[in-house]
Image (tube, helix red, strand yellow):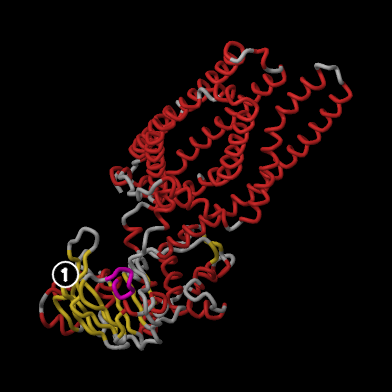
Amino acid sequence: MSINAIKEDEWVSDKSKSETIRRLLSYLWEYKKKIIVVLFIMIYCVAVSIINPLFMEKAVDDYITPKDFKGLFILIGIAVAVNIVWILLVKLRMHMMAGITNNAVRKIREEVFEHLQTLDFKYFDSRPTGKILSRVISDVNSLSNVLSNLVITLIPDSLLLVGIVVIMLIKDWRLALFAMAGFPLLLVSITALENLCHKNWKNVRKKSSNVSAFIHEEIAGIRIVKSYSAEEETLETFDELLDEHKKSFLKAVRVNDFYNPFIEIGWAISSFAMYFAAVKVLGIDNMTIGTLIAFGSYIGLFWQPISNLGDFYNQLITNIAAAERVFDVLDTEPEISDKTGVTELPPIIGAVEFKDVTFAYEDKVKVLKDVSFRVKPGETIALVGPTGAGKTTIVNLISRFYDVQEGTVLIDGHDIKDVTVDSLRHQMGIMTQDNFLFSGTIKDNIRYGKLDATDEEIEAAAKVVNAHDFIMKLEKGYDTELAERGSGLSVGQRQLIAFARTIISNPAILILDEATSSIDTKNELMVQAGIAAILKGRTSFVIAHRLSTIRNADRIFVVDDGQILEEGNHDELMAKGGIYYNLSMAQAV
């Protein structure tokens, strides 16, 4: 993939931030009972924060000034007890919210992963794997603090703010208005910076996704990088992507940094205005020292939650882009899905028919053009032709990995769009040239084709494809642990294991797409003997560039330019002296 393809921006639906926040909150609703407990704890904590300045006011005016130290000590004792409970409840609140948040994030990640498995190949064809991983891992991780702070910052600080305003207005509404003199400045700054911040952090997410995509691609293709000594060029490209990410991040941070100065300035203006009003406007003689101290404390309490809410707002703007990217995945509808009213495909005998099938991928260039053919149950069909002719597309349409734009694909007379996808694919076995082996044992990888297979069935499948002998020579035999993609085994050995995985599913329709291309001649002869037995009584489609592997096919389709140009068995096509004859003679040279 080119660097331009990696840098290409991903489209993300443009939903309102309030809608995204409401959707995030819905994941917390499942834990509403625990959150109600947290809210009661918050109400207590907010109440303590509000009455603490009143404790000070009472201490100064009612006990310190008249020198009533007994009453002062009693008041201090009550205040200490109340605040100790406050400290313990804050810790309990944090512990409860950590559990709620982690469970909510886990649910989101599970939903994203589950939904990804429902999406069709078209979705994955158009996106680098690294960018998909970025949404599942880093973007979901970014939601943890947002979900937590929606409850432990937004709600209590908002309640605290309202409570403080009410208390100040009750005590002296004129002084309260002066104490909030700097608040309009903050509102203006938030309004001015909101959209710019959101746009910048959205760009940071995209740049971070580019880095993840590049790292994944380069690790997957490390053998090619080393084979062509392209380490230096790769590093230069990586540095370029990192530099773009750094610049976007710093730009976003610089805009974010404007919030705190506005809060500090607003706080200073309010403090000055309050004390100025107390001395020059209202007159210091009209209020007690305790009241003035309490108002000074309330100014701090008024602006501290505003500062906290400002930090939370910064965090929200920072991570709302991550939430949008996550929900964009969840909102992507699979193009290949069960429509309303579909039925289960009954056990099939393997009759396949294409009726005037036309198909094109994303670029709208037709890969198949009005293709029609019928295959009898148990027939072996070989597909030959140049690269890009449409051979793999034909078998992909049979498996319904893509949907035709025109025409119909029938299996046993059933339109494959009228049956469930699972019931269709469960009766098919598919093996491609690049078969992926999972981390785990050889036994587990073969059993993937039939999850309830016994050890005896696994061993029998391996024997059919002549994989049993080399497996038993390994130190732990079938219990040998494989690393990702089966590294440690030869390409041919990996393909034999993949072939056993396909065979164990006992499919009614078998698709072999260059299935023996990575097996050496000696092993190929052994596998061909096993294949002959497996193909017997089974409808099979075999794609092969080596024509020697498909000489015994019942029919051979010569595919080129999206059409079937020749059809017949090996002898018939050789007698025609056409395209197949020329291909065969070219390989014989």
Image location of residue 333, percent across then percent down: 36, 62
- Residue 90, percent across and down? 70, 40
Residue pictured at 32% horizontal, 81% vertical: 540
- Please tell me in which quadrant of the rendered image residue 52 appears: top right
Q: Is residue 449 shown left or right of residue 306?
A: left
Q: Residue furthest top?
A: 280
Residue 363 in the image, given as x and y percentages of width and height: 21, 58
Residue beneath disc 1: 560
Left or right, 234 with respect to 487, comes to left
Q: Amino acid at mark 1?
A: Asp
Q: Is residue 338 left or right of residue 551?
A: right
Q: Main secondary structure of the magenta part?
A: loop
Q: Magenta span covers which residues? A: 397-403
Secondary structure beneath label 1: strand
**Quarter location, residue 389:** bottom left
Residue 246 makes an appearance in the image = no
Residue at 36% over, 34% down: 244
Q: From what the image shows, is residue 306 above or below residue 113?
A: above
Pick whichever, 573 or 140, lies toward us.
140
Q: In the rendered view, would you say 112 is above or below 343?
A: above
Please indicate, yes or no, whether residue 115 appears anywhere in the rendered image.
Answer: yes
| Residue, far left | 577
